[in-house]
Amino acid sequence: ALHEKDDNRMSRGKFFIIALVCSFTYYTFPGYLFSTLTSVSWVCWAFPKSVIAQQLGSGMNGLGLGAFTLDWSAVAAFMFSPLVSPFFAIVNIFIGFVIVVYISIPLSYWGFNLYEAKNFPLFSSDLFTKYGQNYNYTAIINDKFELDEAAYNVQGRVHMSMFFALTYGFGFATIASTITHVALFYG
């Protein structure tokens, strides 16, 4: 009858408490207690001594092939929160990600060894000398924070990782293509 209470349905309060406990547990394990779950790579586990396996498999310092994560903050770092963006935008960004990370970087690093890329880590935001040592950028500036050309000639050219170099290049290309798009379509 209509006046009987439906026992098959959960109350809002009970659902909230269950969701709160599950969410807390889900964050606590990979985020605080067992941070290894942030990025799990079977490739790195299978070949722990191989540098190439670490470069291919590591989800934090490599290409992430065969890696998965149980940490929502690692998923959300990809494009803020994938729950907010429309599906076509996520697919578009994912295709660009695949082109850069799985095609451009391996070709540039292992295929062509562009700019002597194998002397440097695959992923790094640091600056390097041509021998792969950290670049001492404080040695090439004077007290007025201007370039000291004599010290620069001694220190040598600045080198960066292939990922960092391609990210810079594609970033500048994105700015130029955005300006061109606006000029052509709205101009």
Image (tube, rainbow, N blue to C red):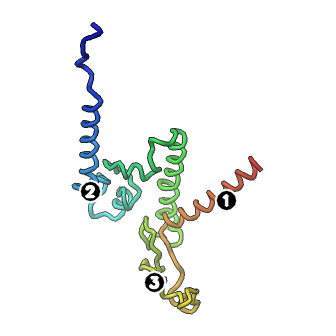
Disc 3: which residue? 136
User: Residue 179 at what x, y percent from top left?
Assistant: 69, 56
Q: Residue at x 31, y 54 (%)?
A: 38
How far apart marks 3 and 1 lie (CA) works out to: 32 Å
Image quarter for residue 58? bottom left
Q: Amino acid at mark 1?
A: Ala
- Compared to 168, does 179 lie above or below? above
Image quarter for residue 57? bottom left
Q: Residue at x 34, y 51 (%)?
A: 67
Local crowd size for mark 2, using a 10 Å CA cut-off: few (<14), some (14–19), many (≥20): some
Which residue is nearer to you in this view: 66 or 112? 66
Number of numbered discs on residues? 3
Local crowd size for mark 3, using a 10 Å CA cut-off: few (<14), some (14–19), many (≥20): some
User: Residue 30 at what x, y percent from top left?
Assistant: 27, 52
Residue at the outermost front position? 3
Q: Amino acid at mark 2?
A: Ser
Disc 1, SS: helix
Q: Residue at x 43, y 72 (%)?
A: 120
Disc 1: which residue? 176
Q: Amino acid at mark 3?
A: Asn
Q: Residue at x 49, y 60 (%)?
A: 105
User: If you read the primary sequence from the N terminus, does the residue marked by circle 3 or circle 1 appear first?
Assistant: 3
- Compared to 96, does 136 lie above or below? below
Q: Is residue 186 left or right of residue 86?
A: right
